[in-house]
Amino acid sequence: MKNIFTILILTCCLVSCQKSQDAIPTVETVTPQSLSALATSGTWRITYSFNANRDETANYTNYTFTFGSNNKLTAVHGGNTIVGNWYAAADDAKAKMQISFPIPASFAKLSHDWVVLERMDTRVKLQNIDTTNGDAHNLIFEKN
């Protein structure tokens, strides 16, 4: 009788320790459409910009970025407004964001064809690899 009771308890413990299929998170495929919808849904700030072993985040502190549905990208800090362009696309089966700021020089550094590494409702992580030297530029936008 003890053996049956022990087997019954062990079986209950093993069954209760199995993970539910509901606990497995689903991974959303990033498309240009989903990226555009997210980007235009509010204002953003750059919380991380690391380029070729240099932290450049301070160049963008206090700027609020607005991705317009007309592909205009506006960065505002106090009375200073910087206007550029942006669009979402796909290349080599990867979602990308093209950003272009002609001036000033610190913002021109953002002018790249960025690969989307991560997309969440409040965060987008981008990366550009320099084709001449292989240096990585990582950029994170977080929603305000």
Image (cartoon, grey):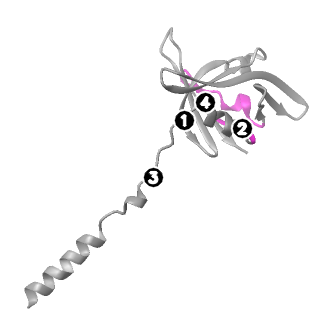
User: Dot 2 surroundings within 10 Å: few (below 14), some, or many (20 or more)?
Assistant: some
Where is residue 123, by image quadrant?
top right
Q: Indicate which disc, 1 or 2, sits on the residue closer to the N terminus.
A: 1
Evaluate if marks 4 and 1 touch, with contact meaning CB atoms under 8 Å apart.
no
The magenta stretch spans residue 3: no
Closer to the chain start, of discs 2 and 4, is 4
Which residue lies under the disc numbered 2?
Answer: 45
Determine the CA span between mark 4 and mark 1: 7 Å
> In the image, what residue type sits under mark 4?
Pro
Secondary structure at numbered mark 2: strand
The magenta-colored residue range is 42-62
**Residue placed furthest toward the front:** 33
Residue 73: x %, y % from top left: 77, 27
Q: Tell me: residue 32, above or below residue 104.
A: below
* Contact check, label 2 and label 3, Cβ < 8 Å: no
**Label annotation for residue 32:** 4
Query: Quarter of the image holding residue 84?
Result: top right
Residue type of the residue flagged with mark 3: Pro
Q: Which residue lies at the image location 78% right of the left edge and 17% below the top edge?
A: 104
Local secondary structure at mark 3: loop
**On the rendered image, what quadrant is the C terminus found in?**
top right
Do residues under tags 1 and 3 come within 8 Å of each other at their CB atoms? Answer: no
Label 1 – label 3 distance at C-alpha: 15 Å
Q: Residue beneath label 1, please?
A: 30
Name which of mark 1 and mark 3 comes first in the sequence. Answer: 3
Tell me the amino acid under the disc marked 1.
Val
Q: Nearer the viewer, mark 1 or mark 2?
A: 1
**Residue 25 image label:** 3
Foreground disc of the pair 3, 4? 4
User: Residue flagged by tag 2: what amino acid is it?
Assistant: Arg
Give whichever of 58, 101 is nearer the camera: 101
| Screen quadrant of the N terminus | bottom left
